[in-house]
Structure formats: C-alpha cells, structure tokens
Amino acid sequence: MKRQAIQKVLTTAALAAMLGMAGGCGSGAGNAASTGNDTSVTEQEAGTENDTDVAEENYETGDASLDDPRNADGIGERELLVVSFGTSYNDNRRLTVGAIEASMEEAFPDWSVRRGFTSQIIIDHVKERDGEVIDNVGEALDRAVDNGVKKLVIQPTHLMDGYEYNDLVEEAAQYADAFESLEIGKPLLSSDEDFAAVMEIITQETAEYDDGNTAVCFMGHGTEAASNGVYAKMQKMLSDAGYAHYYVGTVEASPSLEDVIAAVKEGGYTRVVLEPLMIVAGDHANNDMAGDDADSWKSAFEAEGLEVVTLVRGLGEMEGIRQLLVAHAQEAVALAEAASGGTGRVASADDMVTPEDVVEEGMTPVYADELADGVYDVTVDSSSSMFQIVSARLTVADGSMTAVMTMSGTGYLYVYMGTAEEAAAAPETDYIPFEETAEGAHTYTVPVEALDQGISCAAFSRKKEMWYDRVLLFRADSVPAEAYREGRGASVESLALADGKYTVDVSLTGGSGKASVESPAALTVEDGKAYAVVIFSSPNYDYVKVDGVQYDTCNDELGLQGNSAFRIPVSAFDVNLPVKADTTAMSAPHEIDYTLHFASASIRAAE
C-alpha cells in the first residue's frame, strides 16, 4: 500500500488508533491504574521505572522544562484529554506523547487538549526529580469538572482493548453524569484497517534498511492476556504482505527474543535493525532493547555474530501514527459534538435490534385503582432482546404503582420514562439510576402508569453511551386474581353459583400459539370455590402451576385417556389467569407460560 493509499485509510472513521498503548508493564497505581497484564505497548517503564530503584537512575533523560504537562485551568467547555501510560524520559515524552498532544491541538483548534497519565509511579518520579506536575486520570477528570467542561473526549494512546483500557473506561464512567457528553476513543489497534495502516507506516519508516541482508525487528512489550495476539497478527500481516525480513517479538511474552533470533538466523541475515513497537522510547527501548547488558536484545544479537543497528525512537515520533490517533479521536469528537441536552446521544434504528410489538390486540389498560394495595410479582415484556427484565415486583399503594425491575445484565447506567429523544433533552435529575443488589444485579425502580399498556422507557447504554428506545408491558394476566378489587372479573360469590357441577367455556393463550384446551370444561363448585378440569391438546404435559402451586395430571383419577388433564382452582372468571405448564415433549422438561380465560356468561349446569 503506497503513501496515497495510506492517506486514504487515514481518512476513514474506522481507522484510529494504533500503537500507542500506553500501559501495562508494571502496576501504574494511578487512578486508572495500569494492571501489569495489559499489552499496552507504550513505554511500560518496567525494570527501573516500575520498580523500587527509580530513584537510583544514573542516565540523562533530557530537559523536563521543554515539556508541556498540559494541566492549565480556564480551558473552556470542550476538552480533549489524551491519556497515556507515561514515561520519565523527558526528551522522549516531549517527542512522543507531547507530539501526539500537539497533533490533537492542530486537528481540534476548538478543543482544549489536556494530559493524563495512568502510571502514578512515573507521575511521582517526574515530580520528585524534575518538579513537573502531571495529572493522573482521576485528577484530570476532577480538573475538567472544576473547569466547567461540558463536552469531554478522552483519547487513549493504548495499543489495544486490554486491561488498562478497560480500567480507564470504568473510571471515566464514574464521571458520566458530570458532563453533557463524554466520549472515549477506541484503542489504536481496533480494526483490520488499523493493522494494515500501521504495518505500512512502520515499513516505510524503515525502508532504507531493505538491502536484502538486513532483518528489521520490532520489540513489543507483551502480556499474558489474550490480547497478546496482536503481535502474532502483526507478524502474519507482515509476512502475508511480502515483508519477509520483518519480525515482531516481545519483552515479556510470545514471540520471545529467542523466537526472533531463531527466525533471523534461519533467514540468513547479517545485520539486524532493532526498534520498539511502543509509543514512547523509554526504559524498555533504552535498556531491554538497546542496552549494553548481556541480556539486552542488542547484546543477544551481537552474540550471534550479527551487526546491530538500534533505532531508539517511539512510534509517537512517526507522523503517520499520530494521524491515526487523530483520526480515532475525530470519531469520538464527532459523537460528542452530536450529543445534545442530557447525557449521551439517541440511537438510530440502525443502532438497535428490530423492536418487538409487545402490546397484544384487544388489551385494556388496568390502572392502580382497579388493584388492591399490596406487592405482587409481575411479568414485564420488553420490546428489545437487549433489555431483558428477569423479574419484577409491583407495588400498589395510594392509587399509584411502581415496580422494581431486576435486569439480566449490567449494561445500562440509567433509564428514563419516556422516549430516547426526551431523555437526551431532559435534565439528568430526571434519570433513574440503577441500584445494585448484594448479588451484583442491577435494578431500577420505575413508575407504572398502567398494566397491559405499552410504556415508553429509554435506556442509556454504558458501552455505547447512547439512549435506546424501549417499550415495556407490565402484564395484567401475571398478577394474581386476588389482587383485583371487586368488579374486576367475576367470582363464585358475585355470580351466586351454588355448589354443584357446571360447564364453562375456556380458552388458552401464550406459548407458541399452537397449544389449546378442550372447551367447554367441566366446572365444579365446592364450598363456595370453583375448580375446572382443563384438558390440553397434547399428552406431553406432566404438571401445571397456578399461583405457584403445582397440580399433577388427574387422568388416572378421572379415568381419562390421551391428552393431559388437570383439576385446577378458578379464582376468577372473565380475566386472564396465568399458569405454567411443564412439557416433556423436548429432550429436557420445560415450563411454558400460558393464560386461561373462563367466560362467566357461558356457565351452564351440567346435564
């Protein structure tokens, strides 16, 4: 891919970040602390910077006064926070992290660019040694709040979606309600296009060494995490593209230095060029790669009789890499600019799964004044498979209803009783935040205008940072018949049914819609209570549950052959009564939700 093609890639929204991972080696104890397992291939400051001997460094890292920590106040309402792992190498910090920040300032003149490091060890060391103050992520976020920032974009220089990037997202999420919009750019190697563009950049930057006798070896950091696969992927892309003399290895994982040496020797090369696959050229680049110690990459290759050239420069020094980061930040900036009113944006139809129509034809709303005060289990249908309510408790009190919904996952930060557009324009005080149970489940307490009526409920996605339209249906047929005040449905008493035997028309709804029951059904009234024999259209049911009580088949008792029959209580007529029927037709038994409707007008004395 020639330079012209690279520029084309750089203009695509998908291409953003690539090799600036910033983090991973060593615990960076900052607010978005690096975890030590991230593949963040930025500086990683392991060995010296991340160990206890940082105060004993005996090498010159440059003039810290030339570096701008970008932590000034009074910055306006738009902030672009560039988050890096960090480095204590002053000159290289200016040439890499500082250069990336400068490219952001050039690309986004209406935004104030600020800096945040995730490694507290580096922050403390630079402050103690040079007097330079650099914010950690938490301090940078607090500074943005104190400065009255309304739109905040965070662009990391991480290599991939690893532990450190996820820590950053989690920490930033705690500030989601502090800004009108908050967007986080994706890690650098987020797509195949990113890999291809970075491959082209690093090969062009080292093209002068393509003489047939030289191997070019890039040293990454490496991790035990699954994201270590980015190095193998980059190696494969280089090989597939015909760059047979290019090799990728890692300091702490696979491919190892031994792997790279073996490959270079097999290729018959006499010279090797070493360069870090890291945003900055810090401790790993200066010592593990280019150092004179016997275990450095340089010494190891020289011991094999190869001439060694070391390029101690970070990827952040390459214009192409900086523009990849700018392109990725552009995606996040565009999202932040598009946000209006309240938190986040409104998802389009293309952003959502196809909604289901949860309101059934013929449903009549049931309001609070039709129910007795109390707390009831209620089934909630959702128009989206991405917004599942596993259980809900309905409270009826003083003429109003609320429900506590327990969600199947933890992907939403807020709900709003209304549409997504209304939520985006509403003040955040109107949002309903989740509450976490002891088991870690998320619940929302929401008002319920009526049962059997579609209710608009917008949900704010933690990951996508968008409002999604949902329709909820609190099912009246899932509430026990005793919950209804007198006048809702009919009872044995209201119908003045004497003890005796009757028939009644009955219908079944629910499940796949294919099951049915025989009608009319035999009805018996005993001691003022009604019982019906319900015969299903299949012999594969072994029990039904009514109000949580299990009733087994009564075929043997009644001398009935064939389809499954059950004798169950009828608590009310002319309402939908929820039942669960267990089918054995599948390889494993499965309970299916149905409703039964007994029509009082059809009741006749048995002949």
Image (cartoon, rainbow, N blue to C red):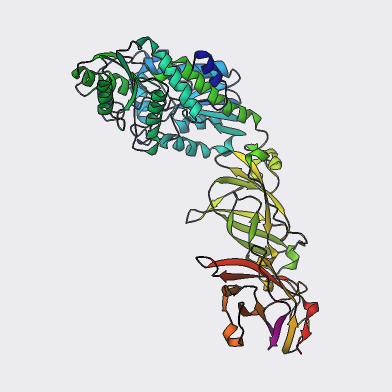
- The boundaries of the magenta stretch are 516-531
* Percent of width and height locating residue 232: 37, 30
Answer yes or no: is residue 124 visible.
yes
Q: Position of residue 150 (x, y in %)?
A: 61, 30
Q: Nearer the viewer, residue 601 or 238?
A: 238
Determine if residue 347 is in view: no
Q: Is residue 401 above or below residue 534?
A: above
520 in magenta: yes
Residue drawn at 63 percent across, 39 percent down: 351
Tell which of 246 and 103 is nearer to you. Answer: 246
Specify whether 595 is left or right of 240: right
Q: Nearer the viewer, residue 444 or 589?
A: 589
Q: Is residue 245 magenta?
A: no
- For the point 53% across and 51% down, which residue is it? 409
Tell me where residue 520 appears, x and y as whole percent: 74, 79
Q: Which of the pair 250/235 is nearer the observer? A: 235
Asked where in the image residue 95 lies, by quadrant, the reply is top left
Q: Residue shown at 64%/58% (left/top)?
A: 380
Q: Is residue 231 left or right of residue 562?
A: left
Residue 383: x percent and y percent? 66, 51
